Image (cartoon, rainbow, N blue to C red):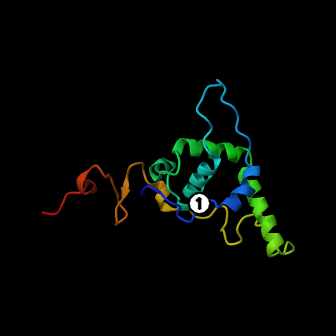
Amino acid sequence: MGLVVQDDGWRVPDELWEQIRPLLPAGKPHPWGVCRPRADDRKLLNGILFVLRTGCQWDALTGTGICAKSTAHDRYLEWKRAGVFEKLWEAALQEYDALQGIDWDWLAMDGAMTKAPLGGEKNRTQSHRSGQERHETQLVDGRAGHPAVRGGGRREPE
């Protein structure tokens, strides 16, 4: 992953940022009163979305040049606790509903809390593997062998 020096097309555009900014909580002052200024929320949002989009580790974020990994992760946790991402999801759904329309009558939720119909009986036959001793490999012919002993405890043919 290299340094991201220009807009890669995935940065939050100005129009979207103006809709997101009011949903973000105000920053809390540092408890000791002396601290660096709070990092830019927009840069951190770009970093958070980069991690969520690419699946990269938080540690790799600093190497991209978007923002610092620790600050982005701290802000992610702060916003998660404040419900920012749920508010974003709700706002996006409402806007999509206004533009395209969502058929709210056709919804489904999987909430089944019962046993699967073909899940088998409760007292079904048990696997033979459960009788295997600890740290013991199962040989192809079904006999037990210990991995530390060469050949599984058997003599090698001459």
In terms of secondary structure, where does tag 1 sit? loop
Amino acid under disc 1: Arg
Q: Which residue is mark 1?
A: 11
Residue at the (76%, 50%) spot, across then down:
22
Question: In the image, 110: left or right of 148?
Answer: right
Residue 122 placement (x, y as % from top left) = 67, 62
Query: In which quadrant of the rendered image does the N terminus lie?
Result: bottom left
Residue at the (67%, 26%) spot, across then down:
31
Q: Quadrant of residue 95?
A: bottom right
Quick one: 10 or 91, which is closer to the camera?
10
Question: In the image, 112: left or right of 145?
Answer: right
Residue 53 placement (x, y as % from top left) = 57, 61
Q: Quadrant of residue 49?
A: bottom right
Task: Check the image and report above or below for 143 versus 31.
Answer: below
Residue at the far top: name it: 32
Task: Check the image and report above or below for 64 versus 27.
Answer: below
Residue 17 placement (x, y as % from top left) = 69, 56
Q: Is residue 113 visible?
A: no
Residue 8 placement (x, y as % from top left) = 52, 64
Q: Is residue 91 visible?
A: yes
